[in-house]
Image: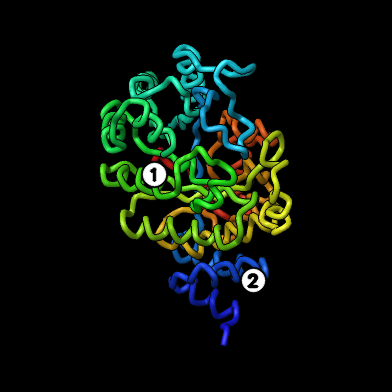
């Protein structure tokens, strides 16, 4: 006899990992406020003082030239195409200087998979950033694999070389959905989910902390979303190296994927809208009790939905994000100052706190 979703939810809140099928049932069948209340209970268990953190930093995309050509990405350009760019070291330095002057403590550095770039270019970028008094959170797993392939190096050697140059932590970009069937549909040239996990495993082995992300609301099924969460959970059980989990919704404007077969079917599943986002956010908190922090995505959902997300399991409001180019390329332009982030957290009844670079 099939168990009810209430029983499944109670077991998950107590820390038992569901099967993929049972987790998908929770997403499909649980009322949003049931998931939200359960996630809030997990958050209060992990963060009983009611503090919600945020960071002052800047996303800097050093190039939009990319050989990967993901169908969900409105940001990338082919080499030589109109609008393609590579930041000069002078431009990079100016952006970092502005960040520090505004109280920023970290630079998030990511870019496309430039077909001409290998480890030497990556090291040059790291050293350019570290001439400034700032922490560097940079290079997603696809970038690290790209540098390794371009330079005939192992992933382990690339990570150790970047660490020696000054890299402090690695962002969780390039995860999208950790299911290769989905990845073949939306980003067939990108590394598979096991290589993404292997980069993170090696980074954690070498002492680098990383974040993990999930982009959902395109063509994936609820089963794929749950499989993603359970794979991140298993890797965290193994290494303990993830500091933060950030789920965010696919932004379709200006992308090839918007016109692809199956996209409308995926959006009809209900996970690309505000209610769907909150359900996935809540399930993320419930199924990832071993990751200390779950972050809202005001960049894709706006301040009000993000504020509601604080009652659906999130305990971090993300970054002031002085600059954001990737989501903005898809026509989404939410902006928040530090003062607005602090006020939004306070208005929800929580205590805002700046967090240090991680």
Kindly report the distance in space between the C-alpha atoms of the residues bearing marks 2 and 1.
31 Å
In the picture, which quadrant includes the C terminus?
top left
In the picture, which quadrant includes the N terminus?
bottom right
Mark 1 crowd level (few <14, some 14–19, many ≥20, 10 Å Cα): many
Determine the secondary structure under disc 2: loop
Q: Position of residue 357 (x, y in %)?
A: 40, 38
Residue visible at 46% across and 11% down in the picture: 90
Q: Which numbered disc, 2 or 1, marks the residue that appears first in the sequence?
A: 2
In the rendered structure, the answer to whether residue 227 lies left or right of residue 132 reads: right
Residue visible at 41% across and 39% down in the picture: 141
Residue bearing the label numbered 1: 210
Residue visible at 69% across and 43% down in the picture: 260
Residue bearing the label numbered 2: 30
Q: Is residue 184 visible?
A: yes
Q: Position of residue 307 (x, y in %)?
A: 64, 51
Mark 2 crowd level (few <14, some 14–19, many ≥20, 10 Å Cα): some
- Of residues 127 and 44, the one nearer the viewer is 127
Residue 292, labelled with which disc?
Answer: none
Instruction: Examine the rendered structure and indicate whether residue 17 appears above or below residue 311.
Output: below
Q: Position of residue 143 (x, y in %)?
A: 43, 33
């Amino acid at each position: 006899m099939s168990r009810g979703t209430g029983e499944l939810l109670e077991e998950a809140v107590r820390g038992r990992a569901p099967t993929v099928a049972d987790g998908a049932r929770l997403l499909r069948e649980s009322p949003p406020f049931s998931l939200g209340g359960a996630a809030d209970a997990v958050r209060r268990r992990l963060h009983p003082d009611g503090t919600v953190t945020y960071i002052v930093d800047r996303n800097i995309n050093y190039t939009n030239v990319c050989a990967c050509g993901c169908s969900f990405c409105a940001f990338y350009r082919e080499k030589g195409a109109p609008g393609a760019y590579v930041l000069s070291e002078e431009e990079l330095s100016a952006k970092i200087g502005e960040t520090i002057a505004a109280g920023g403590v970290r630079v998030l550095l990511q870019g496309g998979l430039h077909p001409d770039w290998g480890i030497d270019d990556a090291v040059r970028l790291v050293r350019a950033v570290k001439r400034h008094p700032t922490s560097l959170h940079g290079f997603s797993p696809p970038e690290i694999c790209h540098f390794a392939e371009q330079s005939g190096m192992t992933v382990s050697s690339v990570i150790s070389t970047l660490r020696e140059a000054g890299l402090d932590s690695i962002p969780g970009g390039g995860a999208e959905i950790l299911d290769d069937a989905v990845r073949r549909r939306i980003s067939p040239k990108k590394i598979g989910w096991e290589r993404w996990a292997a980069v993170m495993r090696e980074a954690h082995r070498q002492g680098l902390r990383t974040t993990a992300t999930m982009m959902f609301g395109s063509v994936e099924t609820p089963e794929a979303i749950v499989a993603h969460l359970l794979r991140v959970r298993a890797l965290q059980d193994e290494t303990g190296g993830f500091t933060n989990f950030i789920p965010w919704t696919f932004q379709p404007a200006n992308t090839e994927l918007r016109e692809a077969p199956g996209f409308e079917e995926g959006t009809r599943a209900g996970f690309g809208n505000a209610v769907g986002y909150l359900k996935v956010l809540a399930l993320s908190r419930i199924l990832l009790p071993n990751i200390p922090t779950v972050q809202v995505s005001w960049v894709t959902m706006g301040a009000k939905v993000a504020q509601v997300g604080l009652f659906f399991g999130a305990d971090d409001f993300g970054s002031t994000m002085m600059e954001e180019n990737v989501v903005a390329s898809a026509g989404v332009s939410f902006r928040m100052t530090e003062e607005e982030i602090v006020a939004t957290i306070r208005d929800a009844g929580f205590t805002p706190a700046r967090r240090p670079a991680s």
